[in-house]
Image: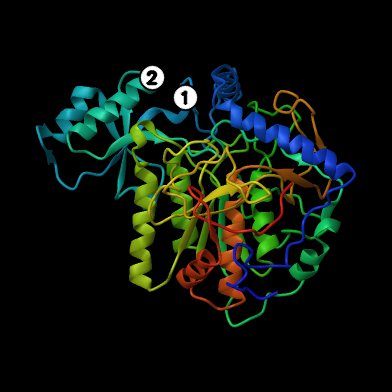
Amino acid sequence: MPFDETNKGDPFYGDFPGLPDRGPWAELAVTVQRQVSELEQLRFNPDARHAFLELLMQRRQPADRRRDAFVTQFDFLPVNVGFDMLLVSGELLLARPAREWVPGGSARGLLDDLGLEVSEVDCDELRSRVLRLIPTQPMGPQQLADAAAVLRSHGLEAAVSNITATAPVHKPPPLGTPGGAAVVDARVEARQQPDGGPGEPAVVAVIDTGIPLELRADGWLNDVLRDGNIDRLDEFPLPDGDGFLDADAGHGMFVAGCVRQVAPGADIRVYRAVDSDGIGSEVRVACEMIRAVKQDGARIVNLSLGCQTPGNVPPVALRAALEIIAEWERETGQEVLIVAAAGNFGDTAPCWPAAFRRVVSVAALTPDLAGAPWSTSGPAITCSTIGQGVYSTFVTGKESPQLDLEATVFPADAWAVWSGTSFAAPQITGALARLYGVNGYPLREALRRLLAAGQPVPGFGQALRILPGI
């Protein structure tokens, strides 16, 4: 059905029928509700959060201390209520000063006083904007945060180097489903035909855990280039894995499947910026954002990841990436939209990059279009859609009993049900790609029309029904 702004709250009315509500699906709905209730309560359970984070840290530390260049060592600032802030171990980030002198003296002298050495970031596109600061003596996470605060008090744009994770700790594990691709037969058929229309296929960048090397017999997402952006699925514990799926293995595949369901004709590119335990640095994410836009022509960038920060300070590298992309837009006359998950923090504190003003911030709704209590909400939210019990493509493997008490097994060509703002954001990404490709709207006009079709929900922006949930 064509897009229709008169269908308030349901702009693609009739295109995405609901999921079954009987048999195994009814049992699945009970499990989903239990999972999201546990996610809502996790902010009040520091012991469970800290134990999980310490497990993830241990999984990255093999006895021989072998370091994979992609594996980011991290630490966290613990809190009693809320979610602990994750940061890269042993470094700060500094926006490269425009001048040598700052109030109170030389920037170099201040760094020397704090015991910080200047180094380059591991991203060519960011080196003119961002510096790494490395302590000459080991600093714990609170010491790093305090040093960054001192630098800011002297007029420097400095912050911890944030971990932009796919979840604040861990989303509920995905659930296997009985239906497979048969549940979305209409969308399978649509995928086999170009969208058509006055526009052209939108190039969509999904910056995430990557995509599995294995191709699917049902054809879903087989057209997406692998090109080194492979989700390793069983990388941890280092050095050789344990035979089970990692904590967020398949996240990128699931997100890309959400985009594909909404926008069958989109040209989807998946980038690996986060490892399969859901951990990635803001520098790597920022670098992949720039590469996707400037080198690969992405017009919509999906970021189903994010972080809260000490003092709500905007992440330095992510801010720089957005500035570089904005400059590229002005130079080329091209439009780019950045869509980001609002976060699963259950509060109104900023979650970055969603909290940046130029980013489309997507919160999660329950299937009855109420604001999900575990979703981040507040004035920074642009829009929202169903994020509970979303159905999409998944990977082959077995969940670790350490991460999923059910030790769920996913067969070849698996589909799964998962909950989180991570899976609300790609629906909005898909809707924008659809309006661009099928209706031929320029991207910002597509965003305006999509938001106009929503129903306002306090704290959740414009609410839109797209994919169903359970």
From the image, tell me which residue sits under label 2.
Answer: 140
Q: Residue 213: percent from the left, percent from the top?
A: 71, 49
User: Which residue is located at x 19 percent, y 32 percent?
Assistant: 153
Q: 24 left or right of 213?
A: right
Depth order, front residue of 112/67: 112
Residue at the extreme left: 104
Is residue 208 placed above or below 246 in the rendered structure? Answer: below
Q: Which mark is residue 299?
A: none
- Disc 1 is placed on an element classified as strand
Q: 396 left or right of 11?
A: right
Kindly tell me whether residue 410 is visible in this rendering.
Answer: no
User: Which residue is located at x 37 percent, y 72 percent?
Assistant: 332
Depth order, front residue of 289/416: 416
Quadrant in which the N terminus appears: bottom right
Contact flag, marks 1 and 2 (Cβ < 8 Å)? yes
Residue at the extreme right: 23
Q: Residue 236: percent from the left, percent from the top?
A: 65, 29
Query: Residue type at mark 1?
Result: Asp
Depth order, front residue of 245/303: 303
Query: Residue type at mark 2?
Result: Gly
Name the N-terminal-most of marks 1 and 2: 1
Circle 2 crowding by C-alpha within 10 Å: few under 14, some 14–19, many from 20: some
Q: Residue 399: percent from the left, percent from the top?
A: 75, 32
Q: Residue 109: percent from the left, percent from the top?
A: 15, 29
From the image, tell me which residue sits under label 1.
Answer: 75
Circle 1 crowding by C-alpha within 10 Å: few under 14, some 14–19, many from 20: many
Kindly tell me whether residue 311 is visible in this rendering.
Answer: yes
Q: Give the CA separation, mark 1 to mark 2.
A: 8 Å
Depth order, front residue of 4/274: 4
- Disc 2 is placed on an element classified as loop
